[in-house]
Amino acid sequence: MIYQILKEAWISISAYKLRTFLTMLGILIGVAAVVMMVSAGQTVQNEITKTFDAMGTNLILIGPGETVKGGVRGGRGKPTVTFADMDSLKGLKDVEAVSYVVNTAVQAVFGANNYGVSVYGTTPDYLTVGNWEIEQGQMFTERDLKSGKPYVVIGQTVVNELFGLQNPVGKVIRLKSQPFTVIGVLKEKGDGMMGDDQDNIVLMPATTLRQRLHSGFRPDFANIGFVKAVSEDKMEAVANRIEYQLRARHRLKEGVDNDFSARLMTDMVEKVRNVGFILSALLAAIASISLVVGSIGIMNMMLVSVTERTREIGTRKALGAPNRWIMFQFLSESVLISFMGSFVGMIVGVVLSQIGGIILEKEVPISVWSVIISVAVAVVVGVVSGLMPALKAMKLDPIEALRYQ
Amino acid sequence: MTEKLQQSSDRHQIVIEVKNLCKTYFMAGGLSQNVLKNISFQIKNGEFVSIMGHSGSGKSTLMNILGCLDRPTSGDYFLDGENVAQKDDTALAHIRGEKIGFVFQNFNLLMKRTIADNVSLPLIYRNVGETERRERAVKMLQQVGLTGYEERLPTQISGGMQQRVAIARALINNPAILFADEPTGNLDTQTSDEIMRLFCQLNRQGITVVLVTHEDDVADYAPRMIKISDGRKEFDGLRADYVKTVQKEQK
Ligand SMILES: Nc1ncnc2c1ncn2[C@@H]1O[C@H](COP(=O)(O)OP(=O)(O)O)[C@@H](O)[C@H]1O
Ligand SMILES: [Mg+2]
C-alpha cells in the first residue's frame, strides 16, 4: 500500500514539474545553507584543535595573576613569575619539562636584508613544550643558557627572508646592532590559529635576551611559563603542586589571591572549542530560517494543490479511496518534495563547502551531520508542512468536492 | 462476466431496498429543507431503473445516498442485504470500492492520467497489483469499445469516449450496481444514444443499472421508472405504463 501511495504521490507531483521544482528549491537552499554553516563551524573547530596540538600537549601555562581593583577583576597584570620560580618547578613530581619565555620584537639584519622578527628568550626545553623540531644545526644548551651565549635558532620565515637559498648555520645576524650566531634552524610549522606566522621566530637563551636586548634594569620575569606534565591525567595534580610551590615562594598568606595563574591547556582548548561550537550552532540556526521559509513554501503549494484538485479528491473518494489514503497521498507528496530538496541540498552544500575549502586551502570535513540534518529536515519539514493540507484534503466531503468547478 | 454477478445472478434477489428514506438539509440560520420524504422501494438484481423528476426534485440527493456517498437523515437502506444507512466514512468508502460503480454527468476523469490509469484507479484502493490492474483495464476498455486508447489522455478523446472510459472505470471492480447521475447530460443526442445502448448492453450482461435523468428519451431505455416529485415518490412502475397514462391525460 505504501508503494502505491508513494507512486500516486510521485505521479501527481511530477505532473507539475516547474511548481514542484520551485518549491523544492526553497528546501534545497535551506539545507545547503545549513550544511555549509555546519561544515564551516567544524572546519574552524578542527583548525583550533590542530593549532593547539601543534603548541604541544599536556601543557600548563603559567602567567601573571588577574589584577583586582575594588573587587572588580581586570585584565592580566605585570609578569610576576621569575626564571628562578620556573626552574624550581622542574623538581616537582610528574613534570616532564619546564620552559619559559621572555619576548620582544626587533629588526633582524643579515647583509643587505632585514626583517621584523619575534624574538623569544627561552630555555632548551622550549622545543619540547612548544612541539618544535630542529631541522638543521642544533638547539642551544643549558650551558649556553647559563653563560648567556649569543646564539640563535631561527624559524623558516627568518631563513627565507634573510638568507634565501644560503645555508644560515654558522652565519652571524644582527639584532639591535648586536651580533648573534645562527646555530640551528627550526622545522616549519605553518600559520597559527589567527593566521599569524609561527615561523617568524628567533629563539635565544633567556639570559642572552635579558642581557643584550633589554635595556635598563628589569628583574628576570618570564612573560609566560610552560610546564609539561608526563600525561594528560596528571595535569590537574601537577597544576596543584605548581600552585602550592609558587604560593610558598611568593610567600602568599592564606586567603590572599594568587599573584600568578596556572591554566591547563586542555581547559583552554575546551573553552575555545566550545566557542567554536556555539558559533557554528548559531550560524546553522540562522541558516535554518531559510528552511522555515522553504517549509512555508511547501505548505502554501500543497494548499493550492488541494484546492485545485478538489474534484480529483472527490472522484477518488467516490471510487472507494478511504480518507486516510487521501491523507497519506498528500502527505507523501510534501514529504517527497522536501526529501528531494533536502537530498539535492545536501549534495550542493557538501560540494560548495569542499570548493570553499579548496579556495581557502583548508581541509573541510564531510560530516555525518550533513546527512542527519538532511534526513531530519526532509521528514520534519515534509510532515509539518504537509499535514495541514493533507488533513484538509481528507476532510473534504465527496459530494461537495464533486460539485466543485 | 464476473464472480460477483454470477454469484448473485438470481433475478429475483433484492440488491437495493430503501425504507422510509428521508433527507433533510440543515442550513445556517436554523433553516432546514426536507429534500427526500419517506421514500421506499426495492430494486432487484439485473434491473434497469431510471429515476426521473424535475430539476431540484431530489434525484441527485437520492442517488448520492444510494451510492453511499451520503447518509440519509432517517430511514433504512439495505444494500445487498446489509443496512448501510448509518455506517461511518471508512465503511462507506469500502462499500463504494467493493459494490458500487458510479458514473457522473461530467465524467470526472483525472486529466493528467492515461485512459488505462483512469480505468484502473479504483483497483489501487483494493491493493491490486500493477500488472493485474493493467490487464483488467485493457479488458474493460475492450468491453466499452475503446481498445487501443489505453495510453491516450482524456483531453485527447471526445466527450462520448470520456464517458465510456468513466463507465469502464465504474465497472472495473465488478460492482453489484452501476449508478449513473445524468450520464448523458453533457453529450449530444447521437452520443447519448450510443452511451444508452452501452448501458442496455451491460444490463443484458446482468449488471443492475440505476440511472438518474430528466430526459424522456433517456428514460425510455429503462424498463422501470421511479419518478420523484418534490422529494416524494410519485410513480414507480413500468415506463411503458407511465407513458400511456400521461398520453391519456394529455388527451
Ligand atoms: N448540500 C446541500 N445543502 C442544502 N441544500 C441542498 C444541498 N444539496 C442539494 N440541496 C437542495 O436539495 C434539493 C434537491 O437537490 P438535488 O438532489 O440536487 O436535485 P436534482 O438532482 O433532482 O436536481 C434542491 O432544492 C437543492 O437546492
Ligand atoms: Mg441532479
Image (cartoon, coloured by chain):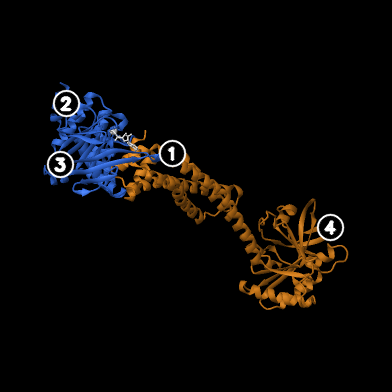
Chain colours: A orange, B blue
Number of the label disc, if any, that sits on residue A252: none
Q: Which residue has dot 3 on it?
A: B44
- Chain bearing tag 3 is B
Task: Kindly identify the residue that appears in the image at 15 percent across and 38 percent down.
Answer: B47
| Amino acid type, label 1 | Val
Have a look at marks 1 and 2 and say if they share a chain.
no
Task: Kindly identify the residue that appears in the image at 29 percent across and 44 percent down.
Answer: B73
- Chain bearing tag 2 is B
| Amino acid type, label 4 | Lys
How far apart marks 3 and 1 lie (CA) works out to 45 Å
Q: Which residue has dot 2 on it?
A: B246
How far apart marks 1 and 2 lie (CA) works out to 51 Å
Q: Of tags 3 and 2, which is closer to the observer?
A: 2
- Chain bearing tag 1 is A
| Label 2 secondary element | helix
Ligand number 1: quarter of image? top left
Residue B133 visible in this rendered orientation of the protein: yes
- Along the viewing direction, whichever of A229 and B14 lies nearer the viewer: B14
Have a look at marks 3 and 2 and say if they share a chain.
yes
Q: Which residue has dot 4 on it?
A: A176
Q: Which residue has dot 1 on it?
A: A304
| Label 1 secondary element | helix
| Amino acid type, label 2 | Val
| Label 3 secondary element | strand
- Along the viewing direction, whichever of B216 and B154 lies nearer the viewer: B216
Disc 2 residue lies near ligand 1 with CB under 8 A: no
How far apart marks 4 and 2 lie (CA) works out to 130 Å
- Along the viewing direction, whichever of A177 and A324 lies nearer the viewer: A324
Marks 4 & 2, CB-CB < 8 Å contact: no
How far apart marks 3 and 2 lie (CA) works out to 26 Å
